[in-house]
Amino acid sequence: MIKNKYVKKFFLLALMLLFGYTSAQKKFTLVLDAGHGGSDHGAIRSYADLGTIAEKDITLSIILKLGRMLEKTKDYKVIYTRKVDEFPSLTERTTLANRSKADLFISVHCNANTKTTAYGTETFVQGPDQNKTNLEVAKAENDVIFLDATDRENFASYDPRSPESLIALKIQQSRYLESSLLFGSFVEDNFSNKDHRFSRGVKQQNLHVLRMNAMPSVLIETGFISNYDESKYLNSEKGQEEVATSIYNAILKYKKLVDRNARPAEPEKPAEAPLKNDFRVLLMALPSKYAPTDPVLKGLNNITIIKENGQYKYYYGVTNYATIRDANLKTAKDAGFRNAMAVGFMPNQKLGSGYYTIEVVVSRDKLSSNSYVLQTLKDVERNKENGVYYYTYGNVKSLEEAIILQKELEAKGIKNTVIQKVAR
Ligand SMILES: [Zn+2]
C-alpha cells in the first residue's frame, strides 16, 4: 500500500514520461495468469468444515471472474495463461505475455504460512529484494520452476549465484517498475479501503514469473490459505467476487491514467544535419550468446550482435542523427541497461588487418555433413575451443558487408547468426 501522496506524484510523472511517446487508440491488452495449476497445487490446506482448499482452484476462479468483467467492454483484450486446471510452464506464461505485447501482466496467487495467524493481502512487483522476510514468498512461488524441464533450461542462466545474474539484476531496475508499483498500489488500496482487508503493502521481490516480462507486471497474493478466516473468504463466492472487483477497478483506474497521458506522436522536426559516424548503443558485452529476441534484451528491437575477442557485444539501433542517438541511449537506459553507451562506427570502414565473418552455429556436437547449414553453405570453417564447435562463414572487410551477408543467410533460413570481428 502506498499512501504517500508525494510518492504517487512521482509515479505519475514517471508514467507520463513512459507513455509520452506511445500513441493511444489501441486495445488495452492484459495477460491474466492464474497461479499454479495441474499437478502444482500451490498452497493447500484442509479444514474440517471447508474441505481441502487449493491455491490453484482459488486463483483460477478469481481470474475467470476478473476476465468476465473485462470482457464485458470492448476496450480490453484479455489473454489467459490458463482457463482450466492445467500447468503452463513459467516460460510459456512469460513468452505468451511478451509475444502478445500486453500492457499489463497480472498473476494471482494465495499465500500460506506455517503460522495460522498470518493474514492479509500483498502485491509484489519485480525488483531487487529489499526485505529478507519476503524471501519465503519468493521461494514458494519460484519453486514451481523445477516442475518443468524447459524452465530449468531457460532459467538456468538466471542462477542468482552466476555472474550473469548481475546483468539480470540490473535489468530488473527496468522501466516497468514505476508503472507496476503504481498499479500494485491501486490494487492494495482497493483491498484495504473497499473490501476492508488487511493490506501488507506493495513489495519489490525477485520473482521469476515477473522477471522475464517486458511490461508492467504484478503478482497479487490475495490472502492466506493457512488462515481459517481468509481461507473461508477466498473459497466463497462473495470473497472471490470482491477480490476480482478490486483488481478490476484498479485496472480501470490505471488504464484511465495511461490513456490520459498518451499523447500523439511528436510532429516532425526541421531537418537535422547527419553526423559523420553511425552510432549504435552498446547494451552489454558478455561471453554468452543470446538471440536478439531473448527477453534478456527487454524487448528492444533492431539488435546487432558483434563478437569480438570472445565477447558478444549487444548493440541497439543505428543512426547518424544525434537526436536519435540520444533517444536510443535513453530508451536503452530506461529498459534497465544503466551502463549503456553510444559507440561511433565509421561507415563503410574497411579493416586494414583482420576481417568480418559470420558465426553461423555454436554447438557442443559436431555438425553432421548433411546438416542444413553444411548442405547450404560452401566453405564453412570449423573451430573447436574448450569442447565447443564454432562454425563461421564468409570473409568481408566492412561491417556493412557483414550485415548484408548475415541478411542473405537469414533469407536462406540460417537464423540467429552473429557477426564476428576477427583480428589478425
Ligand atoms: Zn502461488
Image (spheres, helix red, strand yellow):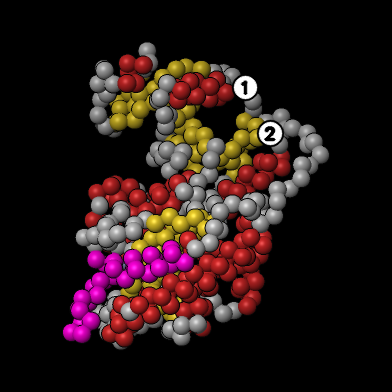
> Mark 2: which amino acid?
Asn
The residue where tag 1 is placed is: 348
Q: Amino acid at mark 1?
A: Asn
Give me the residue at 71% from left, 36% from top. 321
Rendered residue at 43%/43% (across/down): 294
Mark 2 closeness class: few <14, some 14–19, many ≥20 residues within 10 Å = some
- 220 in the magenta segment: no
The front one of 38 and 126 is 38
Q: Residue at x 54, y 58 (%)?
A: 74
Q: What crowding class fits label 1: few (fewer than 14 Cα within 10 Å), some (14-19), or many (20 or more)?
A: few
Q: Which mark is residue 320?
A: 2
Quadrant of the image where one finds ligand 1: bottom left
Q: Which residues lie in the magenta part?
A: 41-69
Camera-side residue of 25 and 206: 25
Disc ID at residue 136: none
Count of marks placed on residues: 2
Is residue 45 part of the magenta span, yes or no? yes
Image-quadrant location for residue 324: top right
Question: Residue at the front extreme?
Answer: 72
